[in-house]
Amino acid sequence: MPLYIAGGFLRDYFSGNQSSKSDIDLASEITPKEIELLSDVQVYMRGSQFGSCIVSTGSNAYDHTILRAESYEATSRLPDIVNGDIYTDLYRRDSTINSALYDIKEGILYTHPKFFSDVDKSIIRSTSNPFITRFEDPLRIIRDFIFASDYLCDIHWLTLLADKFLAKHIQDKVPKERLTAEISKIRYINMFICKLKKTGIYNKVFSFDMRSPFVYKPYRDGLLFWAELCKGNLDLLRSNFTLSKKILKGVSELYRYEDKISFLRSSTTEDNYLHKQYLLRCLRDDLS
């Protein structure tokens, strides 16, 4: 039975970005339960309900996914999985630059028709109608911007249009913990935030007012980003990210002064000017 190298490793290989850290993902028609019966590998059943597992052979571990097709309910981003073939698997992937399968035994490469041109031009494009794929799973919108930031790619105009239009569904359909896990993969967080803000998507996903004056400007945007992401749960940040004590303290202070921050935002009268300056000074002293 054919075994395929899938997705990201092939993207990195053909774009020239391959490194020792490039993960090798595998795909085949074998289910996780069938792999578990093999005697010479260890299998960790993470994501087995979606046809995925981790296969360990000595010092190496690989993500393995069954060739599959997906269908979605309108209210959920979690797919119903059915066995598929090479072509259904290529078209169910997030973007064309990840839509490739290499048959290890036969040496045959199967790709989406746009795979090579989009890898060449560094373009993020949905494998099919982006208004359908991004509505089915709005987390794909975040992934578009992660790839655009980390690989200096442009998002195809139609995919970007769908991303902007459907970003409002991220908060409804994507749990905060899942969003956190995805964002933890980002290498260039400042560029990621910049791209989200430039397209107007940032405010649809993260609700903090970026004009608030109570945090020093050099790291204001990043601090508010982390604060909104964790909703005051610092353990969530500590377990998923490597952040400085200054950032963690800043996030903590945002919630400690939540009532004062609300006052600063809502107060516009001249009578409150001195009080506002005093509160700002207290906040800045605590954050320094």
Image (tube, rainbow, N blue to C red):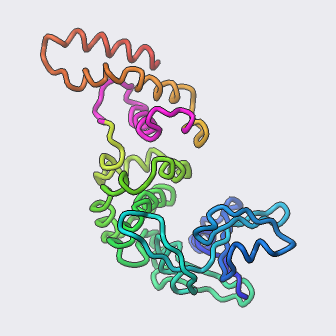
Q: Residue 66 in the image: x percent, y percent?
A: 63, 77
Residue positioned 35% across, 73% down in the render? 132
Q: Which quarter of the figure has residue 31?
A: bottom right
Is residue 221 positioned above or below 54 on the image?
above
The residue at the point 83 percent across, 60 percent down is 59
Q: Mark yes or no: residue 116 visible.
A: no
* Magenta segment main secondary structure: helix
- What segment is highlighted magenta in the picture? 209-236
Q: Nearer the viewer, residue 59 or 84?
A: 84
Classify residue 173 as left or right of residue 272. Answer: right
Report x, y in % for residue 240: 59, 43
Q: Give the answer, above or below, for where 151 lies relative to 94.
A: above
For residue 221: magenta? yes
Position in image of residue 212 (x %, y %): 29, 29
Name which residue lies at 73% across and 88% down: 1
User: Residue at 71% across / 82% down in the picture?
Assistant: 3
- Asked whether, in this view, residue 8 is left or right of residue 162, the answer is right
| Left or right of residue 65: residue 130 | left
Q: Quadrant of residue 243?
A: top right
Q: Nearer the viewer, residue 265 or 199?
A: 265
* Nearer to the camera, 96 or 142: 142
Q: Is residue 60 magenta?
A: no
